[in-house]
Image (cartoon, rainbow, N blue to C red):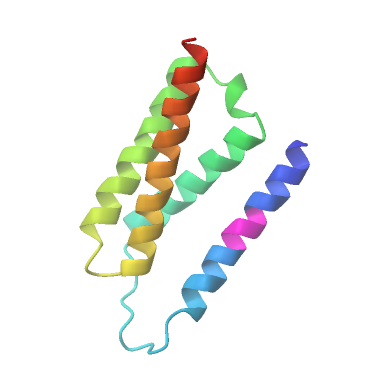
Amino acid sequence: MGLIMTFVMILVFIACTVGITLSIKNKNILNKPSWGILISLVFQLLLFTLFFTEVLASFPKVIAHLLWWGAVLSGLIFGIRDFKNNLITSVLSILLSVSLAGLMFLMLAITSM
């Protein structure tokens, strides 16, 4: 199951990259995204992959929470900061941050029952 989810997450990453590249009609309008937002996107996609392949469960709980909330906060901060420069990557980063936060709140709600 973990290999299938890894393959699916790689396909999602490729689809997002191709979609961002093809959605721009005028290349002069696009500004290059900052390194911070690119690193944040890679970090968020890595956490999604680790979560769905259940590798994240083998990490110590404190480290997993720090990585998780670090990815959420960095995605939101860089997404909002880079919003005027590159709209597409910023919206993608903000959406990934919100979905990561939603998954964490769902996990906390399920484990507290």
Q: Outermost residue, top direction?
A: 113
x 43%, y 48%: residue: 96
Extent of the magenta region = 10-14
**Left or right of residue 9, residue 24 in this image:** left
Q: Position of residue 3 (x, y in %)?
A: 76, 42
x 28%, y 52%: residue: 78
x 30%, y 39%: residue: 73
Residue 87, magenta (yes or no): no
Residue 12, magenta (yes or no): yes
Q: Outermost residue, front direction?
A: 113
Q: Position of residue 75 (x, y in %)?
A: 34, 47
Choose between 37 and 108: the one closer to the eye. 108
**Left or right of residue 80, residue 71 in this image:** right
> How many numbered circles are shown?
0
Q: Quadrant of residue 63?
A: top left
x 38%, y 43%: residue: 98
Q: Main secondary structure of the magenta part?
A: helix
Quadrant of the snapshot with the N terminus: top right
Q: Position of residue 27 (x, y in %)?
A: 38, 87
Q: Position of residue 101 (x, y in %)?
A: 39, 35
Choose between 72 and 59: the one closer to the eye. 72
Q: Is residue 38 above or below residue 71?
A: below
